[in-house]
Each structure stands twice: as structure tokens, then as C-alpha cells.
Image (cartoon, rainbow, N blue to C red):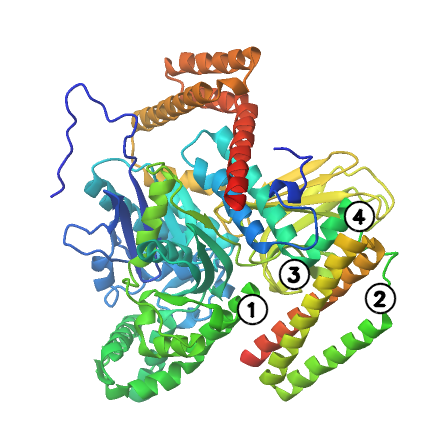
Amino acid sequence: MDLSQNHFELFGLPQSYALDRDMLDTAYRELQNTVHPDRFAAQPEAEQRVAMQWATQVNEAYQTLKHPVNRGVYLLKLQGIDAFDANNTKMAPAFLMQQMEWRETIEDARAAKNASALDALSDDLRATHRQIETHLAELVDTAHDFAAASEAVRQLRFMDKLIAEVGDVYEELES
Amino acid sequence: MALLQIAEPGMTTAPHQHRLAVGIDLGTTNSLVATVRSGLAVVLDDESGHSLLPSVVRYCASGDVEVGYAAQAAQNSDPHNAIASVKRFMGRGIADIDDVASLPYHFVDAPGMVQLKTAAGVKSPVEVSAEILKVLRQRAEAAMGGELVGAVITVPAYFDDAQRQATKDAAQLAGLNVLRLLNEPTAAAIAYGLDNASEGVYAVYDLGGGTFDISILKLSRGVFEVLSTNGDSALGGDDFDQRIFCWMLEQGRFAPLSAGDMRMLLTKARNAKEALTEHTDVRVTAVLSTGEMMDATLTQAVFNAMTAGLVNKTLAPTRKALRDAGLSVDEIKGVVMVGGSTRMPCIRHAVAGLFKQTPLTNLDPDKVVALGAAMQADVLAGNRAGDDWLLLDVIPLSLGLETMGGLTEKVIPRNTTIPTARAQEFTTFKDGQTAMSVHVLQGERELASDCRSLARFELRGIPPMVAGAARIRVTFQVDADGLLSVAAREQSSGVEASVQVKPSYGLADDDITRMLKDAFTYAKDDMYTRALNEQIVDAQGLIAATRAAMTEDAALLDEAETAAIEASIAALENLMAGTDHKAIKRGIEALNAATTVFAQRRMDQNVRRAMAGQKLETFG
């Protein structure tokens, strides 16, 4: 296994935040088709072990690149930057205000058992998520502003947490 | 009658010999075995033409064990010893089973897994399941005329590590080589998807006798990628029977029931449920051993009303699986129904309502899982070129560790594609702390006490340091069966500890060895001959595969490396001439070790070739 190869190189993709998801998926399937342990089930144990290591690595790389936050964290790490460094928690006040409003909306929807309010909120959250992703692609790929990119990655993680909370409320309303 | 194949004199079938492999659906209510014959998956029937084997095992005082229809027929007369739905007890403690009071068995609260007291002694659910598997194995070997290379055994996708491990232990006890534990909805998807050459995102809704699974899969160019899975490993057709049973008690106003009457009413309840699949009402009558009677009509409307809560209990996990996959119902191309319980009109109606489409029911919901498992067994046994399709499955429940304050720290989140490995660093809490207890958990809850405890082990010999200075790296590895192993290592000193996750709920290896000894009546010499033959066959296979690889990729080895592998082969061949099966096993391990670097280089080459083809395809 070539450990000097980064995840983008592994899939033959350009090292950028903007991602051609179809190319990633196709390359992932092609790689797993080659390295998956099922391909070596009737082969000697040495080959099975290597297959297991490769399949694990390919899964890890795919999960990293596929996920908007993980991809951002990984790209910044390749630049030597830790997006979640405890000493770097800068966040625009307007974004934090918006977070608080969304949280109130979630609480209201929970209290009123209002599923359609949750649906509307979900759409909003996903739209904002996509906007931040687009912005992050500009910051990383064009502007090379990695400090601002770190903040955008942290914002994305906030959004993921909110979306997960909405999921929890759906679950509560459904049970 | 099966026809035996006879080879032409002087010809051997050696190079492309068909290796006998089966798929087994080890169900709560019924079990099946299937195989691939001439490229077609078929369920194997018993000598009376039955394909289903009722998952009922009866232990007689004489020591005889009955499995299937005979045991099922004895349920009313011998309720304590005829064990049904044992799958519900696999990997479970007594506290996990809600309806202990309304079951006719004598439960024994054993550490780890609950046990059952029978006329033939105390039995673990693993032993009971092994009896079912043994019958299916014999059925397959009789039908196929030879010893099996291995089996793919299906498990509910929502089974946790303890339940999976228990299933694997049962197979081992039945003398089956487990090629793979395969999730039931995924098995169904193979049978269904390959049959229909489908592409797109599908939901598999699998309601069996005792378990419920929902899996969302993406089918694309032969790859079955599970996007998410959810379910309830204690919800199934049995619960619907239980509701009718309660209704019968209300109707009859009976005095406390004997175990035999209880079993009889449960059987009547199930018959009533099945009748309601075809009819809008059913007359239910019963006469107890006490002379008490009931006679009432159950309408579909009443049945639907009293089971609406159960139906809803399947819809919540379904919605959750959709959310986890990041999909809306409009994006689901089809919904495949699996499991006998999906025959109920109320289920079909609810699923159609949720997904806004008519669910697909064109494959027999009782057989589709076994058929898919047989197809996968055929691939894993090496009977196909192997490039027909690929399964990418996920773990159903998050895996983590207990941290300070009894909280759960997730290490691998649910719905992560397997195989997978993840490492996390932890540190010491006290100055001079030299040991750390590692408690491995599975589940979604924040409190460790609300999650399932999979294993505990200790890392000792950490050099004394100030609190927070030690760096302990805990690595979780989940293999393609979905089974977990955990290792911990202190980074500065290199102190290590690891476990194959087993102890808390599975059986220890010693237990398995003891039970195997109990189960097999082989004379000692037979055991020895069998072991020796197995090792020789393995060694021959390994040498042949190694030689083939060396011919194919001679360029990847220099002279010294080639010589080293040749030396290992020669050493193994030398051992094969002897009669020490343990020595041969060591020789096999040595040859495997000697070819590790070669295997890595071959894989690197495969990957380079695959990705080169990939680029041409993309730009071509």
C-alpha cells in the first residue's frame, strides 16, 4: 500500500474542495471492486489480509472525501492546519445569532409537535449548508484563505449538529 | 433422486472443481438452506419436499433431539422442551427479553446469555440454534453429495455484535465453516436486484418472525452499497400473534393458563393471523384442558386496530434510515418486501402509504433471503470469476467506549461501511495511573449503562506520568462479517492489550471446544484423520495458489525473494509427507507470512491497473 498517496491521489481526483461526486463514486466502486476481501475469499490468507487493509483504507478515504466537513478538515490538514484547534474558535457573531434563532425554531416545533415547521426548517438548514460549501470551495480552491476556510468548516459542523437535532425531534414526534 | 456425476476416466475435475457452498437463512420461525446449481439459486427441500424447516428444537428425556415439523407438532404437549423462536434469545440476557412471563420455557439466568432448562439438561440458545443448522447441513450434504466448503449465514441487519458472534458460534458448533455473516436485507437485495437487473436506490423492508430490518441500498453497475440500516431486533410476527393471544384471553376470561394451553392458544393466534391475510374475518375457537372455552370472531378491522402500534414501530426506524441516508421517499425507486410477516395486508398498506408506491412482492418473501445468501456463498467459495457483483455493507449501531462519568464516546458511528478501522486517543485521569480499563460499547445512547456492553479489558503497565500525559490509542477494527476487535496501545512505552470482542455475551472459546467435544461422537482417531486431511487440503490449495501467483507475477519478486518463498513451499511439502496436522498448520502460517510482501505488491499492481483503466474510461 502506498502510504505517501493522499486520498485525492488514491481516487485519481484533483486536490480541491469542489468535488465531482460522480467521479468519486465511480473511482470508489472501481477500487473496492479490485481490493475488497470478497474478491480474495478463496485466496491464501496473506492476500486476504492485504485485501482487508486496502478495503479499510479505501472506505476511510471515501468517507473522508464524501463528507463535506471531513473533506474540509482533511484538505486543511494537508496544509498543516487543524480546523478544530482549541485555540482557534473564531466564529462570526451573525452566524452565532442565526444559530440561536434556529435552535429556538427547533424548540418551538418540538413543543408544538409541528412536523411541517420542521420540514421547512430542514430545507433552510440544507440550503445554508450548501451555501457554506460553495463558499468553502472558493476559499480553499481559489482564494487559498485557509484561516477563513477553517471558520467555514466549523460553521459546517455546527450545521450538521443542528440537522442531527432536527432528526432527533422528528424521531421524538414519530414515537 | 439426485444423479451422481461421474468423470471420464483419466480426467479430473481438479482445476475448476465446483466447491459446495450454501446459503442459510436461520430464521426466528423457519429456516432454509439454498445453493447455486448450474448458475441458478435453488432452495433445497427435505426428503418430504418441504423447503421450510420450522425453527423448533425439542429435547427429549431420552436424549433424542427433534428439529422441525416433529418438534413443532410437540409444542402443545411438551411446551417446556420444544423450543421455538430461539433466535430471539441469541446474545441476550434475561433482562433483555420482555415477555419472559408469557413464554412456556424454564429460563436460567446465566452470565452473558440466558439459558434454557430442558429434559436433556440446560441448553444455551447457541446450542439450540446449532441443532437447526446441523439439520440444514445434513440436508445440503445429502442433496449435493459431498462435504460443504462453507456457508453464508444470514443475520438481521440490526443484530449487534453479541448476536452476530452468537450466530457464528452456533455455526461453528454445527461444524459449518462460515464464509460470511450476511445481513438479511442485503441478501434479499442480491436475489432481487440480480433477478431484475435493477439500478437506483431501493428500500428493503424485512419483517420476520422476531426481527425487523430496514435497509436503504444503492444498486449501481453490480455494486450493492448499503447507505443506511435500522430496525428492531425484538419485533416481528410473534408480537402480532401475542396481540391476538391477549385478545383471546379477554374473550375467554380464562383462569391462569397451563403451559400447554398457553402454547395451544399461541398456535391458534398465529393461525388466525394467517387467515386474516386472505379473509376479512376469522372465527377463533378454543377448548382448554380445563374445559374452559372461547368462540369469537376476529375481524381484520379489530386486528388492524390492535396491531397499529406494532406497525408504527416499524415505520419510525424506516424514516430514520431514510434520514440517515439523506434521502426523501421520492428518491426511492422501489421497496422490496421480505419476511413472511410482510404478507399481512396492514403491513403492505402502511409501507405503501409511507413510500407512496406499491411495494414489490414478486419474489417469495420466505425464500428470497436464503437465495441471496446462496448466491453470495457461490462467489465466496470461488465458483465464479468474482467480478459479477460486490456488496458494501454497514454496521447498524455505533461502536464506542465508556469514558469518565459513565458516558459513551463513539469511535465508529452507525452506518459506516465495513470493513473499517478507526483509532481514537485517550489519556489518564490520575497522576501516576498505570492501568486503564477499556469498556467497549454498542448503541446510540449517551449513557454507557444504556448501551450494550460488548467487552471489558485492561491495559496495564502504563509508565507512571502526570494525569493527561499518557497517550493511549484505542483502535477498533470491524471485519467484513461486522465483527469487532479492539486493541489499545500506550504510545510512548508501546504497552499493548487487545481483545477479539466476545466475552460479555458470546461464548468463550473454551465453551465452544467443550460443546464440540460433546457434540461430535467421532472416535479420537477419526478426529485426528479428519484434522490431518483438512490441513493437507488447505496446504495443497495454498501451494497451488502461491505457485500460480508466482508464475503470473514473477517480475514482482527478485531472486532472493523467489528463493525464500520456494524454501517455505518445500518446507511445507516436507511436513505434508508426515502425519502431524499441527506442524502442517504451522507450515501454512509460515508460507502465508513469507508471501505477505508479495501479496501487497500484487495488490498495488491490481490497483494501478484498475485506476489506469478508470482514467481511460472517464476521459474516453
Which of B385/B619 is in front? B619
Q: Which mark is residue B323?
A: 1
Residue indicated by mark 4? B428
Q: Mark 4 and 2 residues: CB-CB less than 8 Å, in contact? A: no
Kindly indicate whether the residues beneath marks 1 and 2 are on one polypeptide chain. no
Horizontal and vertical percent position of residue B411: 65, 53
Kindly indicate whether the residues beneath marks 4 and 2 are on one polypeptide chain. no
Asked if residue B319 can be seen in this view, the reply is yes
Quadrant in which the N terminus of chain B appears: top left
Q: Nearer the N terminus, badge 4 or badge 1? A: 1
Kindly indicate whether the residues beneath marks 3 and 2 are on one polypeptide chain. no
Residue indicated by mark 3? B448
Measured in 3D between alpha carbons, the distance from the residue under mark 4 to the one under mark 3, in whole angstroms, is: 19 Å
Asked if residue A85 can be seen in this view, the reply is no
Horizontal and vertical percent position of residue B170: 39, 47
Camera-near label (4 vs 1) is 1
Disc 4 crowd rating (10 Å Cα; few below 14, some 14-19, many 20+) is many
> Callout 3: helix, strand or loop?
helix
Q: Amino acid at mark 1?
A: Arg
Image vertical order of residue B495 relative to residue B207, above or below: above
Camera-near label (4 vs 2) is 2
Horizontal and vertical percent position of residue A100: 78, 77
Which of A77/B61 is in front? A77
Residue indicated by mark 2? A91
Q: Mark 4 and 3 residues: CB-CB less than 8 Å, in contact? A: no
Number of marks in picture: 4
Chain of the residue under label 4: B
